[in-house]
DNA sequence: ATATTGTGTATGTACGATATATACAATTGG
DNA sequence: CCAATTGTATATATCGTACATACACAATAT
């Protein structure tokens, strides 16, 4: 499990955490029932408050990515392969809609867009 | 000149305005030295505060898209064709970097990404 | 000249979201 | 049972967004 925070990002901390854990779970990098580190530990390592970590955890639980056992810890929800793929597709679809709208709004053609992706996707 | 606000969007109002005007300027839909409507008028039509419009206008000026003559109004900055194209590319590049990082983070391959763009770009 | 109208600007306020420290409650495990 | 460990709740501080209102400057008609 790995979390990297960006201080320059305009994204809230709890959301950065949420997204990164989301990604790791749908990719299967975190196995089912894997026990996440205590929020205190995460907070200490990232040098942020416990509450902020909890907020990310709450959102993860709300979306069905993890489950909580009070006094014991938080665990990765057991999702089958196709469920994980489905959740990933949900995340992609939701974001893609807004993103493409932006580029369309700037007047980019589909062809231009494809060329940009082709060019920069693997070379950031 | 046209501005459409979304109440459901999680984007700030002033930013929605900024982006839409940006787009219209780099696309050349607003001619150089075109006089924008008074912020009071825009505010009234959109049923928002003058301050919010001003905030969008400020950002547009900061980015060199418009210039202000106090007492007279705000005007579209005179940009040559290649300058406009350059600014559009700047906007695209800045956003594309973050967007692609997100999809990469979810484990999408370049091929998958291309297929999604191919499929949904013109059919939102 | 100067009053009036139109323009952008500044001040002060309110609210919600973000993030924090600290204290609390539930559960585990020796 | 008790101490340690876990997640949870309360109260507070700060920042960003948005607002209403009053101000300052420019243009123009009188």
Image (tube, coloured by chain):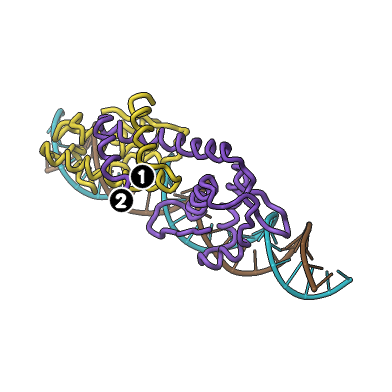
Chain colours: A purple, B yellow, C brown, D cyan
Compare residues A23 and B71 and report the one nearer the observer: A23
Q: Where residue A29 sits in the image (x, y, percent)?
A: 53, 52
Do circles 1 and 2 both sit on a common chain? no
In which quadrant of the rendered image does the C terminus of chain B lie?
A: top left
Query: How far is disc 1 from disc 2 in space, using C-alphas?
Result: 8 Å
Please indicate, yes or no, whether residue B38 appears anywhere in the rendered image. no
Classify mark 2: helix, strand or loop. loop
Q: Is residue A109 above or below residue A116?
A: above
Which chain letter goes with mark 1? B
- Left/right placement of residue B114 relative to residue D28 reads right
Q: Where residue A54 sits in the image (x, y, percent)?
A: 60, 55
Please indicate, yes or no, whether residue B39 appears anywhere in the rendered image. yes
Classify mark 1: helix, strand or loop. helix
Which residue shows up at 36% across the image and 38% down it? B111
Which residue shows up at 29% across the image and 50% down it? A123
- Left/right placement of residue C14 relative to residue B84 reads right
Compare residues A74 and B87 and report the one nearer the observer: A74
Q: Where residue B46 sits in the image (x, y, percent)?
A: 37, 30
Q: Which mark is residue B100?
A: 1
Question: Is mark 1 in CB contact (under 8 Å) with mark 2?
Answer: yes
Q: Where residue B4 sits in the image (x, y, percent)?
A: 36, 29
Which residue shows up at 53% across the image and 67% down it? A45
Q: Is residue A47 above or below residue B13?
A: below
Examine the image and state in which quarter residue B85 appears: top left
Which chain letter goes with mark 2? A
Q: Which residue is mark 2?
A: A124
Q: Which mark is residue B79?
A: none
- Left/right placement of residue B100 relative to residue A32 reads left
Sort mark 2 into few (<14), some (14-19) or many (20+) by Cα contacts within 10 Å. Answer: few
Q: Is residue A113 above or below residue A35?
A: above
- Left/right placement of residue B41 relative to residue B73 reads right
Sort mark 1 into few (<14), some (14-19) or many (20+) by Cα contacts within 10 Å. Answer: many
């Amino acid at each position: 499990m790995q979390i990297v925070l960006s201080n320059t990002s305009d994204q809230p901390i709890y959301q950065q955490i949420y997204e990164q854990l989301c990604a790791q779970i749908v990719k299967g990098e975190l196995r089912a029932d894997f026990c996440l580190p205590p929020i205190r530990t995460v907070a200490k390592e990232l040098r942020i408050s416990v509450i902020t970590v909890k907020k990310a955890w709450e959102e993860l639980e709300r979306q069905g990515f993890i489950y909580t056992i009070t006094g014991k810890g938080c665990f990765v929800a057991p999702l089958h392969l196709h469920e994980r793929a489905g959740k990933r597709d949900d995340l992609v679809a939701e974001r893609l809609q807004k993103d493409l709208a932006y580029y369309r709004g700037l007047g980019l053609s589909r062809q231009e867009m494809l060329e940009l992706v082709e060019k920069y996707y693997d070379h950031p």
